[in-house]
Image: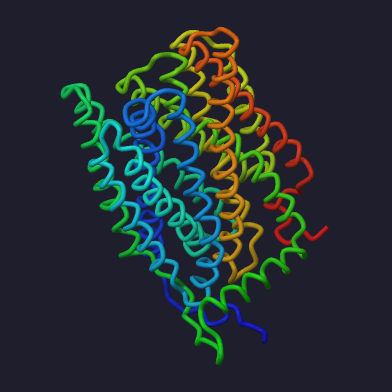
Amino acid sequence: MELSSPIQSAKKIKETPEMAKRARWAWYLYDFGNSAYAAVILLAVYSAYFKGTVVGGARGSWLWGLSIGIAMLIVTVLSPILGTIADFVAAKKRFLFVFTALSVTATSLLFFVEAGDILSGMIFFIIAEVGYRAAQVFYDALLPEISSQEDMAKVSGNGWAIGSAGGVVCLLIVLPLIILFKGALMVRVSMIITAVFYALSSIPLFLWVKEKAEPQALPAGENYLSLAYKRLSTTIKSTRQFRQFIRFIIAFLVYNDGILMILDFAAIIGAVLFGMNQQQLIILMIIVQVTSIGGAFLFGIIADRLGSKRAIVYSLVMMLVTVCSLVFIQSLVGFYLLAAVAGFALTGVQSVSRTMVGQISPEGKSGEFYGLFSVAGRTSSFIGPTVYGWVAVGAANYFHSVGQTLHVAEQSGQRAAVLSAAAFLVVGLILLFFVKDASRNKKETA
């Protein structure tokens, strides 16, 4: 049975320039809100709180990596199937709403996690992370609906930059409260603030962004689950016609490991290697978010002018130099400087990678191809943090067994884990050289 593409039954919506502009800003604002989740929960506050207060010691690094890995494994299974269904029934926004609500609710529940509440701290975070990551599949899949092939890189870069600004704003709200009111209570209150910030920023997208495809009738004898598997199987087979897509996804899977390993453990690295407190960690992440705004804009321009692949290569090289330098840096000021460079580089990698998927995807299958892109990203999210946590705790135990104190051994374990992230970046960069520039060859098959 040949299944028609949703694009074939697209609504002929007469969209005015004002409507198009408003839809783009609504799409940007969603990123503004969910970047606050990334900044507070993943990067600056909850990760360090979970490792240092809820768990404590090197075991906290391992359990943090395990929690991220479990969440990413769940999303790996769900996202391609849900992406396929969303394309067929024109329900990207509905799925986006469900997973956004899930993430916002679970994020607010992190307020109840206190010292020793390891299980609930992991469960609530895993649910929040599943919602956050799964929602991104449908958010990314809306990119082709609000932009043209020609300006997709620019729109994606703008979204990433404005999203980074959202992370800065939320951190600036949280930071004074944590400084003024000492103790764990205000750290926990920041989880509620983040949830509210995320929820409010997402509202414009659900009001102003219109899906251009109409739902199709369910074929006789099919249900949505069987249909999803059938369309997904067809999509996987069709990717053989898009060899550059396969090569890019393999490269992305590997280098994205390295990026996420550093991102997910940034606050833990700062706390262990440099003794940073909660206020210093928030300031660190504000620096990262601010420089990432510039990186998103610059690498979006580079992608437009020189091609998406070249922009990713430049940003990966910059990220690799930064990560390797982290092993040798000793001063807190030096760490701040490296974080600034890393923030500038990492948005180039992530934003332009998202753009390349939109440029490679055939019309009418953006949800499915972004679902496959999500599988690669979530698989690397599962592998990378798990490997990092395992290396960090394993190396720490080894160095302690040969005579280092617990604190010094934990620092040595973090440096070993950082080197493992660098290895992923190197391999991913090498694989990327075998990919032709998708921005110039949208349907390259050779």
Which of 446 and 411 lies nearest the eye of the viewer? 411
- The residue positioned 55% from the left and 34% from the top of the image is 261
Q: Is residue 339 left or right of residue 36?
A: right
| Residue at image point 62% right, 20% down | 324
Across and down, in percent, residue 102 comes to: 34, 57
Quadrant of the rendering where the C terminus is positioned: bottom right
- Residue 387 occupies quadrant: top right
Question: In the displayed structure, does residue 1 sit left or right of residue 81?
Answer: right
**Residue with the most extreme right position:** 446
In the picture as drawn, the residue positioned furthest to the left comes out as 181
Q: Identify the image quadrant of residue 164.
A: top left
Image spot of residue 192 (x, y percent): 23, 43
| Quarter location, residue 241 | bottom right
Q: Position of residue 84 (x, y in %)?
A: 55, 70
Percent position of residue 11, x then y:
47, 79
* Quadrant in which the N terminus is drawn: bottom right
Q: Which one is nearer the viewer's eye here, 245 or 418?
A: 418
